[in-house]
Amino acid sequence: MERYITALSYHVPSETVHIFLDITIYVFLYITASEEAQILSVESLSAKQQNMLAVMDSLNMCMLENDWEYTPEDPAFLWTALFYTIGNYPNIRDNESTGAIKIDSYEGIMTVYYKLIQEYATGITETYEELPALPADCCVMQNADTEYYDFPMGDRGISYGKIASWTVNADGTNTVVTELRAADDESLIGAYEYTLVDNSYADGMADPMFAYTVRSATKLQAD
């Protein structure tokens, strides 16, 4: 074996061996890195990633305040999640200027165009196909103009949502921990771990609100 290696070294220029080794090491490191999860800095998240806080923060409130699990296939859950998300974040885009949302502060009502509601729904669940019928006891009402729905306006109280961590997984999914905290003393109210995937509905939109959508949400136990 030693004689073989000696002969190989003699016939192959040293520069070529070095280049070959450099390329081999680079390819190995690239493949290894691509197979590992990438933890992102929360401070450097893109606007598309930051937009998902609207969905996750509102889902946190929806599930914690109603003692629900993440069940978007349930019409009551989906419409309640929409109530929280649209109520907390009506202007992710300038939805008022386009007429997609009409706010009547005196009556405490937001009138929302159904296509905008659908776009919010695509961020709330990966399995969204169409808006389900309104449950009988739902706080949302269908407007006399059937293309609009009336959402009561509420006050979220002294709380805020925060993305605590964002990890891009090797399979292309994203694992995101989002917290709900009290605004007065920063205490943790609750936290969920979300699995986010690319929002297929966003592909055909010029300016989508949500580039990602929720696949699952799991409540985290307090330490």
Image (cartoon, helix red, strand yellow):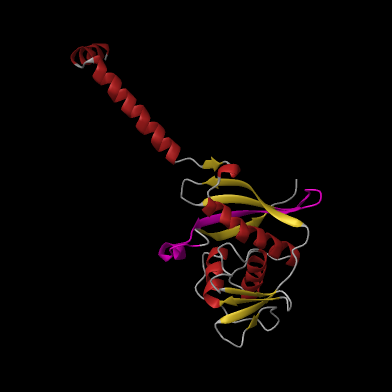
**Stretch of the chain drawn in magenta:** 180-208
Residue 183: give x, y in percent of width and height.
77, 52
Q: Is residue 203 in the magenta section?
A: yes
Residue 121: give x, y in percent of width and height.
56, 69
**Left or right: 17 with respect to 87?**
left
Q: Residue at x 58, y 71 (%)?
A: 73
Q: Residue 180 lies in what quarter of the image?
A: bottom right
- Res 84 seen here: yes
- Rendered position, 85 above or below 26: below
- Rendered position, 189 above or below 141: above
Q: Residue 92 lies in what quarter of the image?
A: bottom right
* Residue reaching furthest to the right: 185
- Res 131 seen here: no
Quadrant (top left/top right/bottom left/bottom right) for the C terminus: top right
Residue 29: give x, y in percent of width and height.
41, 32
Q: Nearer the viewer, residue 55 or 6?
A: 55
Quadrant (top left/top right/bottom left/bottom right) for the N terminus: top left
